[in-house]
Amino acid sequence: MKKRMICALLALALLAGSLPVSAAFSDIPSDAERWAAESLASLGIVNGTGGGSFNPNGTLTRAEFCKMAVLAAGFTEVSLYSSYTIFPDVLASEWFAPYVNAAVRKYQIIRGDSAGNFNPHNPITYGEAVTILLRMLGYTIEDIGYFWPRDDALKADQIGLNRGMRSFSTSDSLTRGQAAILLRNLLMTEQKEGGLYISKAFRTGEVSVLGATHETDPTLAAGEVRLYAGEEASVVSSSADLSGDLVGLRGTPVYPQSGGSLLGFIVDTENLETAVVQSTDIDAVTTADGGRISIPRTCKLLISAGMVDYAESYYDLRPGATIYLYRDDGGAVSLVTGGQTALALASTGVYGVDDLVFVRGSTIIKHGSEVTEDEIDKYDVVSYVAEEKTYYVSDDRVTLLYESADPSYSSPTTIQAGGHTFSISQEATRYFENLSLGRTITLLFDCNGNVAAAFSSARVGGKVPAILTELGGEATVKLLSGLELKGTPSFAGFPNVDTGDGEGVSSLYAQVGRIVGFSQDSSGRFTFSTYSFRDASAGDVDPVKGTVGRYAFSPEIRIFEEPSEGMPLNEIEQEDLGPVTLPASKVRHIEIDDAGKVSLLILSNITGDAFTYGFISQFQTQVPDGTGLDGEPIYRTQYTLRLRTADGVTEYVTFRNPGLRNTSSMVPGGIATSVLSQAYSEVPPAFKLERTATVTRDDFDAREGVRIGNVFVPLADNVLIYAKSLDRFLTLSEARSNFSIFEIYCDRDPGDGGKVRIILVS
């Protein structure tokens, strides 16, 4: 997802080792678990659970851990191990079968129980996990001892396999977060015969600090990262989407054994500590908890200019920022990273309220574009950077309940509003003098996302656009500026919709995943309004030029696609639009900013990636929906869709006719992924795929795509290949080896950028 381009990026003043713009996993409070999970994710060894979550306290099944273990060993030959059954409870059709089979045949690290079963769905215990990893490291029962699992746990402790983990008994179920630490340790542990385990499948580079990714430093191109090995910086290409949460940390770069782009980055947590800055001087940092850390003046400090001596730029460590400190073997701090997370602003004020005089010849930037003073609105926050002779303007704001403050209501350094804690600078404190606790206030933010001012909601108020990401007893909203808030929702204004048999559900649930108007009321409830799409007849979309009709894209443009009308939105990047001009009919909504550029663009289905594809059948039944005046029951038509994929069969219920034929036979099609997890939807999300072409095996270009006429059509990453004669799904290599005719089903016309989603072979 594209991040909002804050003024710090525009000014190219981010610290090379600054704190992250974003983290891949947002729900891991433990630094050790988060860094381990991010490290493994960069190599494709672990995945999240969806929505940016990792669920660190959840347990792992034996099958899930087995998959992680063989991926850590560099396993890639899934198709070779997916067509046979070893354990009676691990059928070849199961998603985990190739990983379990490889663990038995290729790596010889697992065995069945006394009945010959693997028990794939049982939670894996700590004792079982370390036994598997010790076998991977080359240890035998003669090396470990004969009393399992006690001796295995003792051996793991002896070689440091469990370093950084909390204490487990051998029978305890292993959590996902702790498993990440354990697997990260495996990679960086010496094998019995010598050499780090990671060297079995990968090539490692020199220990380095991850200085920046293209998301944290706009001078880097997409796919580039900056590494610091000692004081020397190098820019390398990366095939991994490294999380910003790893920036500023020291670790081991990981490459393919045969050479190529950076694959991942394994964080080294040895001799690492974190601190929050309260103040700095030339030879020490005072921390937020009142501690004082001595810093040698020649200690290296990572800033935008590169590695410098601490004494030269200690003042660049901003109060309130988190820093990373690395100590040498003698215990002295030898490296400091992080700390400067945003552009230093010389002065900030509120337009139309404070006396602001613009310097002649200066530049004014709003929403990433140059504007004139006439295009600044009352209550916009204006920040001046003297060394650039530039003003940065922000209109980000939100109305929330003023819940508490410290140390005083009228002169706070921190406040609680909307269930969120905000830091208040000394300059912003003056705006709180006449504000009352327990009332709604509107916070105004500067271009760095910090609170710059506050006013009563009676003076400055109204709802702001936000994405309603979750709804239940608690609602989660994410403002378009990136701020995420959680609180109790109000369902006022959203009447219930019948779901059959006299039951109902608030129509607010239909807004989950969509843009809504948001604010908080005086009772503390999150209130919402529908966000109406405006007339979108601005013209065709040219993705290459970055225009909609005569309007150019804003540098901060947010682009979403609506998989089907009324469905949750899917945020995409400009490059996802492809090279082909999109007709104006694809534009659902457009907003133009003060600079006359497109700041928000919502399109109909463009990428096709927001759907889950498979074979669909539709059934309809009559369900009770109350009683008529004559006392007779009233019935409503309910439609049930069954979607078959390689992962099994999923059912989805709707009261809107999806338009498919009512039959038990399954046809190729797609269902919006966002609705598959919902118990109910008023929107028909399904559509049937029409056959695009019939080709032979010679029309395929390895695993990349297929030639249809004169057009080369890419295969979707998760393309489904199905043999009706075998009634099962195949890999492409298996299909090409055994079949000659291939029916191709694309999500849209290949000439318009369609991808192959389903292939039927015969």
Image (tube, grey):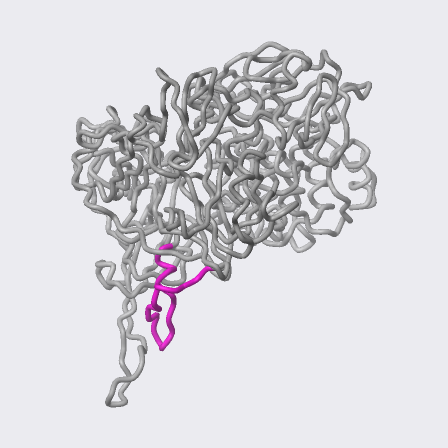
Q: Residue at x 40, y 41 (%)?
A: 480
Given residues 105 and 530, the one toward you in this image is 530
Q: Please identify the residue farthest to the front as the structure is shown.
A: 355
Which quadrant would the N terminus be assigned to in this image?
Answer: top left
Give the left or right position of residue 685, taking residue 49 as reference.
left
Could you say where residue 26 lies in the image, as x and y percent from the top left?
Answer: 54, 42
Give the left or right position of residue 134, taking residue 119 as reference.
right
Residue 165 in sight from this viewpoint: yes
Residue 509 on the magenta span: yes
Given residues 734 and 629, the one toward you in this image is 629
**Residue extent of the magenta highlight:** 489-511
Could you say where residue 695 lies in the image, as x and y percent from the top left?
Answer: 22, 35
Given residues 59 and 215, the one toward you in this image is 215
Could you say where residue 696 lies in the image, as x and y percent from the top left?
Answer: 24, 33
Q: Please identify the residue farthest to the top as the structure is shown.
A: 232
Could you say where residue 584 lies in the image, as x and y percent from the top left?
Answer: 17, 38
